[in-house]
Image (cartoon, rainbow, N blue to C red):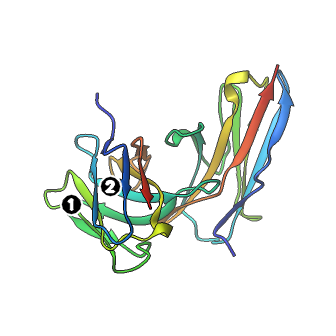
Amino acid sequence: RKEVEQDPGPFNVPEGATVAFNCTYSNSASQSFFWYRQDCRKEPKLLMSVYSSGNEDGRFTAQLNRASQYISLLIRDSKLSDSATYLCVVRFNKFYFGSGTKLNVKP
Amino acid sequence: GAGVSQTPSNKVTEKGKYVELRCDPISGHTALYWYRQSLGQGPEFLIYFQGTGAADDSGLPNDRFFAVRPEGSVSTLKIQRTERGDSAVYLCASSPGLAGGQETQYFGPGTRLLVL
């Protein structure tokens, strides 16, 4: 079983839509959680860290559910520029990346 | 300031050859990570350094792979007797530290390795 699992998508949504991704992790002792964004043929870039209390950054909201071992990312009012692959990252000593969820925002 | 840089950006080699991939982390970052990413997959952990020492090398696939960071800054990933299955993008990342908000990783652009 993979340490971090994500739905690969793609999620095809119109501009302005709200879209949510989930990610599950296997190790209940995991220490830190992140969402990274990766554009095609580019390096991953940090989107946001995920805290137990949940956190918001503009149109992006991340939630952590330790009991069920999943994290989520909600994107409101999607923009064309949000089209990318979103990587879920979990740290237990070292960092484990999911395979990513692809988002296509259409005009 | 300058981000993480990696050289070369692309490397084509023949099966059986030796390659070295270089990573220059952000100045002052004590932690440095190497990952390998294949098409359609997320980055796969190889090794990370805290300072000069390899804190965890459990992701290195076999003894053909080796990495060093002799002065706690620049790191080199070395692959001996390359195989076609080694073809991937090799990503380097650095972070200010390892905990408490210092663990955010900043990635370099990667080295695309193609073994023919």
Q: Residue at x 38, y 47 (%)?
A: B102
Residue A8 in sight from this viewpoint: yes
Per the image, the residue denoted by label 2 is B32
Q: Residues within 10 Å of mark 1 (few under 14, many from 20)?
A: some
Side (left or right) of B64 relative to A12: left
Q: Residue at x 69, y 76 (%)?
A: A1
Residue B76 vertical placement versus A92 (above, below) = above
Side (left or right) of B65 relative to A80: left
| Amino acid type shown at disc 1 | Arg
In front of the other: B103 or B66: B66
Image quarter where the N terminus of chain B lies is top left
Q: Residues within 10 Å of mark 2 (few under 14, many from 20)?
A: many
Per the image, the residue denoted by label 1 is B69
Q: Which element type, helix, strand or loop, lies under badge 1?
A: loop
**Measured from the top left, where is residue B3 in percent x and y?**
33, 35
Residue A75 in sight from this viewpoint: no
Query: Pointer 1 and pointer 2: residues touching (CB < 8 Å)?
Result: yes
Q: Chain of mark 1?
A: B
Side (left or right) of A19 relative to A24: right
Residue A107 vertical placement versus B78 (above, below) = above
Q: Residue furthest left?
A: B71
In front of the other: B96 or B116: B116
